[in-house]
Image: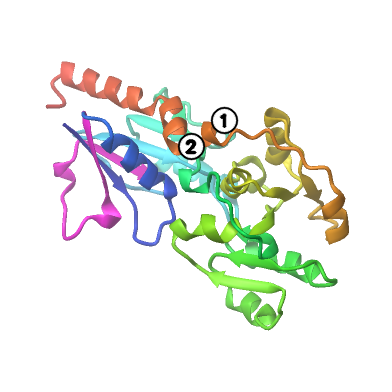
Amino acid sequence: MVKILFLRSQKAYLPEVDAYVKYFNSKKEFQAYDSSRIKGEYKLDEFDVIWEFKGLGGVNTKEKVLVHEYASLSTGGFPKIKNAVKKWLNPKPDLRIFLNANVKDGFGFNDGIDYCFRDMGIDESFIKLNTKKEYEFVYVGAICKSRGIDNFLKIFTEKDNGKICLVGKVEDCIYNMYKNNRNIIFTGKVPYSEVPRIASKAIYGINYIPDQYPFNIQTSTKLLEYLALGLKIVSTDYKWVRQFEEKHNCSFYKLDCHNLRFDLNEINKYQYTSNFVADNFLWETIIANSKIEEKIKEILKRRNSRGLYN
């Protein structure tokens, strides 16, 4: 039995960890653990594979199989410099996992270490929900100035655009400004299991992503979840979303975040298209197609043949 430990802090929002644990625990060869849910103390020596979601630094051992997952590029100030620092200072793992080719290219590793791609997936709880509509729009995610949500709400409230439900942790300054607006509903941070039920009460899903690096080249999980719920998509216009439309034969109403305007009448009139196949984006399918399981088995087999693993 191969024991995998996914290292996650108590505060980290990583739905993929739950998906990984469920996936590997369905296999007879593996037993997977989420470090944030282990009661009491544990030792790394108890596990065969150590799986980290990379920031800077981390575990450095040749005795265990190390998996480094780069689910996104660095954000905040000087992101490309941060990428370079991680490239040079992080320990070398046995396997790297990247969200997509954009993320891999952004880090620029060239040390020959094996890798694979694992895009974002959706939980099956987002599929086929039939809920009575209670508001026009829903936005799921961080409600903060760094994502430009303050600018969006300013434009949204300039006229009657119906009701919007905002799901996620909200900055105090934004909440205090709009808490008395009858058309804005703040749920605060809710358990992930509650998101499908809340979001399904909307007609439109708001995918408000700044058209700036690295947000504009990375997968929008909320957009996948909106589509799985059958919502119509209202999105800012940026590189990844256009690539997605073309690849999956979809058409979304797009906002120009550099010249933002928001009009419910125009949004209602738009001819939306979605040929999104939700089953193809279920976590089990995404993980299986990534070939991560096969890569780990290959690494373990090589180590076993050299006497480095038992």
* First to last magenta residue range: 29-52
Task: Based on the picture, tell me whether residue 147 belongs to the magenta stretch.
Answer: no
Label 1 packing within 10 angstroms: few (<14), some (14-19), many (20+): some
Q: Residue at x 38, y 38 (%)?
A: 68
On the rendered structure, is 159 left or right of 199? Answer: right
The three-letter amino acid code for the residue at tag 1 is Ala
Count of numbered labels shown in the rendering:
2
The three-letter amino acid code for the residue at tag 2 is Leu
Residue situated in front as seen by the camera: 82 or 254: 254
Q: Position of residue 43 (x, y in %)?
A: 15, 49
On the rendered structure, is 238 left or right of 41? Answer: right
Which element carries disc 2, helix, strand or loop? loop
Which element carries disc 1, helix, strand or loop? helix
Judging by the rendered image, the residue that carries numbered circle 1 is 101
Q: Position of residue 52 (x, y in %)?
A: 35, 44
Judging by the rendered image, the residue that carries numbered circle 2 is 282
Q: CA distance from mark 2 to mark 1?
A: 20 Å
Q: Residue at x 23, y 24 (%)?
A: 300
